Image (cartoon, rainbow, N blue to C red):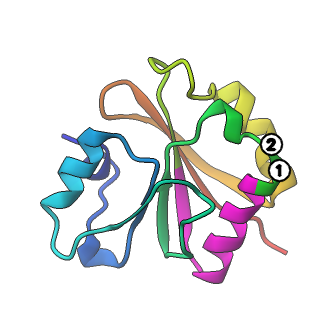
Amino acid sequence: MGALADLGLSTEGGAIMLVSAPDSVLAEASRMKPRPAFASTILTAEPTSRILWWPERAHLEPGLLSRLAWMTSVARGEAWLILDPAEPESPRVDELTPLLGAASLTLVEQRPIGRGEIALHVRPAPR
C-alpha cells in the first residue's frame, strides 16, 4: 500500500493537496478520480481540507509551519507531515514536534506508514 492508502485517504472524502510528494505517492495519486492537487512547495500550495507535506529539514522555520497552520485553518481541515528516516533531508520527529506549538499546530497522532515513513497528523491549535 502507498502513503495515501495507509492513511485511509481518497479524494472521495474531499480535496487533497500533496506538497513535495515523492514519485511513489504521485503515482498512487494518479490512479485516483478526481486526482489530488499537487504543489512543489508549501509556498505554492493552496488551502485544502486535507494536506500532506513531505518537508525537508531546511523547511523547519516558523513561517512555513505557520503557513501550513493557516491553510488548514482557512480550509477547516487537517494535515499530515510525512517524515522519511531514510532521507537525509527529512527532519526527525524530535526536530519537528517541538516546533508545532509555536506554529499554532496540534499533534493529533503519530504513526508509521508506507515504507518506513512516519506520519504526523496535525490540526490547527484551538484558539
Using the image as rendered, state which of residue 40 and residue 97 is in the foreground: 40
Q: How far apart are marks 1 and 2 (CA)?
A: 7 Å
Residue at 63% across, 25% down:
92
**Residues in magenta?**
64-80
Looking at the image, residue 119 sits to the left or right of residue 114; the answer is right
Looking at the image, residue 30 sits to the left or right of residue 124; the answer is left
Contact, mark 1 vs mark 2 (Cβ under 8 Å): yes
In the displayed structure, would residue 109 be above or below residue 33?
Answer: above
Measuring from the top left, give residue 4's x and y in whole percent: 30, 52
Mark 1 closeness class: few <14, some 14–19, many ≥20 residues within 10 Å:
some
Pick whichever of labels 1 and 2 is earlier in the sequence.
1
Please say whether residue 27 is one of the residues in the magenta stretch: no
Question: Disc 1 marks which amino acid?
Answer: Pro
Residue at 38% across, 69% down:
16
Q: Specify the quadrant that holds the N terminus.
A: top left
Name the residue that disc number 2 marks.
Answer: 99
Looking at the image, residue 24 sits to the left or right of residue 118; the answer is left
Measuring from the top left, give residue 28's x and y in whole percent: 19, 50
Question: Disc 2 marks which amino acid?
Answer: Leu
How many marks can you see? Answer: 2
Looking at the image, residue 37 sits to the left or right of residue 72; the answer is left
In the displayed structure, would residue 71 be above or below residue 122?
Answer: below
Query: Could you say which quadrant of the image residue 127 lies in?
Result: bottom right
Residue at 83% across, 50% down:
62
Query: Could you say which quadrant of the image residue 6 lies in?
Result: top left
Measuring from the top left, give residue 48's x and y in whole percent: 50, 75
Secondary structure beneath dot 1 equals helix
Most common SS among magenta residues: helix
Name the residue that disc number 1 marks.
Answer: 62
